Amino acid sequence: MKRITFLTVTLVTPFITHSMDGPKYVTPEAIIIHKKDVVKLRLTTYTMLQNFQSDEKKSAYRLIKVIEQTNCLKQACITERELGFLLFNQKPSFGSSIFSNSTIDHFHASVFFERLGKYNQNLAQQVHISPNKAQLNLHWKNQHLHKIAAKSTAFGITIPESTLTEKVIPTLPAVDVAAFDALMLHIGKMIQEDSKIMKKTAKLIYHNELKNQPAPISPENFQNLEDTH
């Protein structure tokens, strides 16, 4: 079996229910329909969480990519919470088989999507948007100019405000860089926690979903990725 097929089946394979007599939860149809994009997002998320640094440009760019892929799936009516609960139910061996030297696992990923959901919800309520790569680069450039101007005072030099006004190109008011920076800091703290803590955290987050554990679905419902190529 090809590797990519295994990943797809692993990601959208039916969950196991704790009690066959209890209420059944069926994997959202949208996730099954868009399984390839969900697999891609999962891999992007794990890549982003590996060696994440809250003050590193590469980490910020990877986070933007995760946000963009998530927003695409949201257009297909797949929520961050559904993605988080899906990852919560994944086998730990999946992540460790790819990232063997990593302490990041599916519990970290599931908690991340809950935080991402809050981030997107808050932006929507304030009619703000998350920065893209170009907007973030512009923000960093402006910060750098202000830092240089501030340091010049140590030399007895004052950069005129008119010069800074001319050089600095502000981002659009709706681009919420501050919220993005806060998200970066929270992810940095989250990945420092060990798996046991993250598992307990995820159980509290998805308490209601866990009371309605999904029922098994026949593997025949899923096509191999190569069949759709």
Image (cartoon, rainbow, N blue to C red):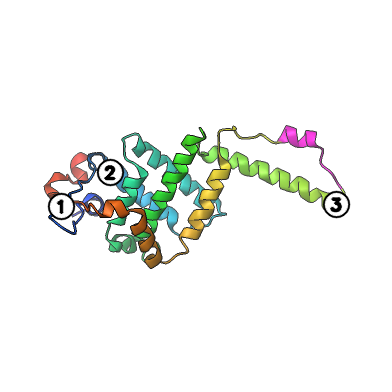
Mark 2 Cα-neighbour bin, 10 Å: few <14, some 14–19, many ≥20: some
**Residue at the outermost right position:** 156
Q: Amino acid at mark 2?
A: Lys
Q: Is residue 30 left or right of residue 102?
A: left
How far is mark 3 from mark 2, CA to CA? 57 Å
Give whichever of discs 3 and 2 has the lower sequence position. Answer: 2
- Disc 3 secondary structure class: helix
Q: From the image, which quarter does the N terminus lie in?
A: bottom left
Main SS category, magenta section: helix
- Disc 1 secondary structure class: loop
Q: Which residue is mark 1?
A: 216
Comparing 204 with 146, the one in front is 204
Q: Which residue is mark 3?
A: 155
Q: Is residue 181 left or right of residue 226?
A: right
Q: Which residues are magenta?
A: 157-167
Q: From the image, which quarter does the C terminus lie in?
A: top left
Q: Residue at x 44, y 45 (%)?
A: 118
Whether 168 is drawn above or below 59: the answer is above
Q: Amino acid at mark 3?
A: Phe
Mark 3 Cα-neighbour bin, 10 Å: few <14, some 14–19, many ≥20: few
- The quarter of the displayed image where residue 179 is located: top right
Residue 171 is situated, as x and y percent measured from the top left of the image, at: 61, 35
